[in-house]
Amino acid sequence: MSVPESETAERLLSAAAVRSAAEGMLRLAEDGDLADWKVDLGRLEVAADLTAETVRLNYPDLDVPFHARWRHFTVAGRDLWAELDTPSDPDERARAAFDLVIPSVLLDAGAGMGWRYKDPGTGAVLGRSEGLGVASLRLFQSGALSAHPDDPLRADALGRVDAALIAKGFQVSDDNPLAGLEGRAALLRRLGAVVARPGDLFDEMKARALGGRLPAPTILDVLLRRLGPIWPGRVELAGRPLGDCWPHPKPGHHDAFVPLHKLSQWMSYSLIEPLQAAGVDVVELNGLTGLAEYRNGGLFVDTGVLVLRDPAAAGRPQPVDSPLVVGWRSLTVALLDKLAPMVRERLGVSARDFPLARVLEGGSWAAGRRIAAEKRADGGPPIAVISDGTVF
């Protein structure tokens, strides 16, 4: 008997579905049943050694924070969020934190190798995710996203965001180009159309905490259901936008789609700290998955865990919805689950004290960037992906 599309859509909108599909994809790769990828699990030892070494280099005391947008708000030893004149009330402060970090994550599409942001507060010159993060914080701090002149630290005027506002805030010029200005602005306008204020989502999540405890997958659940309509041109099933979820000829499980939800999960990781600061005990951190993006995925390609059946494909830009890229991203999720315990063993830490959010930060993402810089002059990913900036 066929499963109703509404039930399939409901199942695909979860971290559990991401993990299940990834495990199925890895089984296919192990059986030699993927057209694009081979897997060599013996090389995971190399990836684990590099990741553990990178953790110790970056955090000698092993006091690793979660992989979250907040890491990009610390510049030259200064916590720029802590320097803002935020509300003293814990719930209001959490709403302001949501107002900052949700648009900031959405603005973190690829910056390109040439764009730079000179922070007027610290004098630091930053590129890539770090620059986009600080630029978005300064834009928020300026009150440009607030409908209340006397209360700048709000994001309740997203409907008026346009490309010119982003260009000004991000110091864009002919000599400092940043691609996708209109796309970034349109994404924030769509966000403002589905939630009057991102900070309102804090109240929704807090209301779903039982006894003050909120499972991390519930954070993702709220985001996928409330923010699904903001993503452009995505697959829908039974009228439900599926977000970062793609068809694949061999999905590795009983559905025709492979869910990944990378950006929404990174946003989920980034909302844990403001929830905790407001007294909500976020539990089941490992219920979220690793992030299916090119730093983590590049780590496995560059260490030889994942091998393209057609090596020449690495030199051809691949569409983000291609079976090659969808398979690569899904395999990355499954391999991160295998990598994490190996890294913990090398560091002598437990899963409870060192959840996946710390492995990613310490960690696999940093190790992926590190080995990319060693292997390629521009430090870019091993495979070029054609994306609209809402996936990676």
Image (cartoon, rainbow, N blue to C red):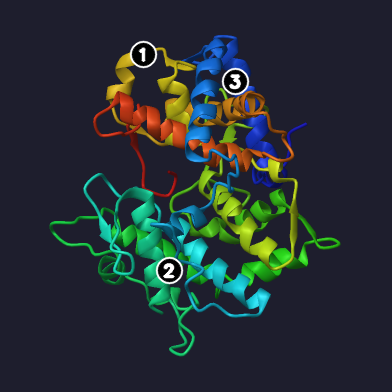
In the image, what residue type sits under mark 1?
Asp
Relative side of 94 to 281, left or right: left
Report x, y in % for residue 84: 48, 74
At a point 25% along the width and 54% down the height, the residue shown is 116
**Amino acid of disc 3:** Leu
Mark 3 = which residue?
26
Counting residues from the N terminus, which is met first, the one under dot 1 or under dot 3? Answer: 3
Q: Residue furthest bottom?
A: 150
Determine crowd level at label 1: few under 14, some 14-19, many 20+ residues with C-alpha closer than 10 A: few
Q: Tag on residue 302?
A: none
Q: Which residue is mark 2?
A: 189
The three-letter amino acid code for the residue at tag 2 is Arg
Q: CA distance from mark 2 to mark 3?
A: 38 Å
Instruction: Return the residue at label 1.
Output: 310
Mark toward the viewer: 2 or 3: 3
Q: Quadrant of the C terminus?
A: top left
